[in-house]
Amino acid sequence: MKFSKIVIPIFVTAAIFLTSCVTNKKLTYLQSEGVREEFIAITPATYIIQPYDNLFIRVVTPDPKLSDMFNTLPATSIGGSITEQSADMLSYTVDGEGAIELPYAGRFIVAGKTLSMVKTELDNALKSYVTDAVVTVKMINNYVSIIGEVQNPGRYPIYKERLNIFQALAMAGDLGLFSDRQKIQLIRQTPDGNIVKEFTIKDRNIIGSQFFYVMPNDVIYAPPMKGRFFQMNAFPYSVILSTITTFVLLWNVLK
């Protein structure tokens, strides 16, 4: 009996200590020090086109024949609307040298430029064919990959230009309980190569940082907290408690 009075309280105390590792402070987003803060709205960085990107380019003119001449698909196909499938068929893959080949307009170097810069160049190039053309240039097949301690890791399409980090994580079902919110890692493609950055989403300052908006082809990695093995849902408390209880009963019977 004396043995049980010593062992059981020790086990209960250890269990309480281990289950208290994940606190509300570790899980809460956008924390502040209680001082009212005002953030200046930031403009997302303009995406720079890179080799092997896919560009949707459409040229529309009042003359359907001219439109058909520049577009892979007729401008009036599918009721005049552009679906995801037709947009993919109208896309141009930037080659390894950073160029695309547009019918009748020639070869254009687009890597290292923004979408608006490419649109302006195409507008000027097409003036020799038609003066009233409307050119649309967009990125398609944009994805963000979210891996690690999230509910549903995977590769998700980006349908809007200003997708922020919280909207991206929401697509993956939010961070897991044991995700380290202070050490979120971002792998981002740049014209100079891939970069890896680490940041926290616990602090409200994320709203005004360069990491707030997601870029095409970003990889977001949510690492686990240290000591995850000892958390409540991973530690076999029931088995250990059952073993101790059985041992205590046998001890009392046999002594």
Image (cartoon, rainbow, N blue to C red):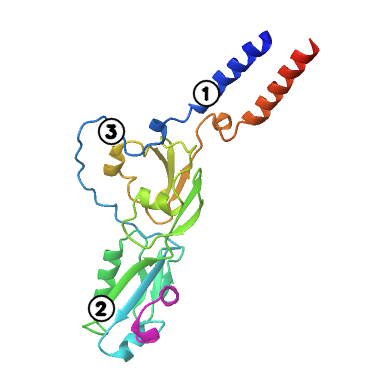
For the record, the magenta segment spans 75-89
According to the image, label 3 marks what residue?
Answer: 32
- In the image, residue 87 sits, relative to residue 64, either above or below, namely above
Query: What kind of residue is marked 2?
Result: Val
Marks 2/3 in contact by CB < 8 Å: the verdict is no
Marks 2/1 in contact by CB < 8 Å: the verdict is no
- Cα separation, mark 3 vs mark 1, equals 28 Å
Q: Is residue 231 visible?
A: yes
At numbered mark 3, what does the secondary structure look like: helix, strand or loop? Answer: loop
At numbered mark 1, what does the secondary structure look like: helix, strand or loop? Answer: helix
According to the image, label 2 marks what residue?
Answer: 134
- Image point (34%, 45%), residue name: 211
Q: Nearer the viewer, mark 3 or mark 1?
A: 1
Label 2 packing within 10 angstroms: few (<14), some (14-19), many (20+): some
Q: Is residue 190 visible?
A: no
According to the image, label 1 marks what residue?
Answer: 16
**Horizontal arrangement in the rendering, residue 72 relative to residue 253 (left or right):** left
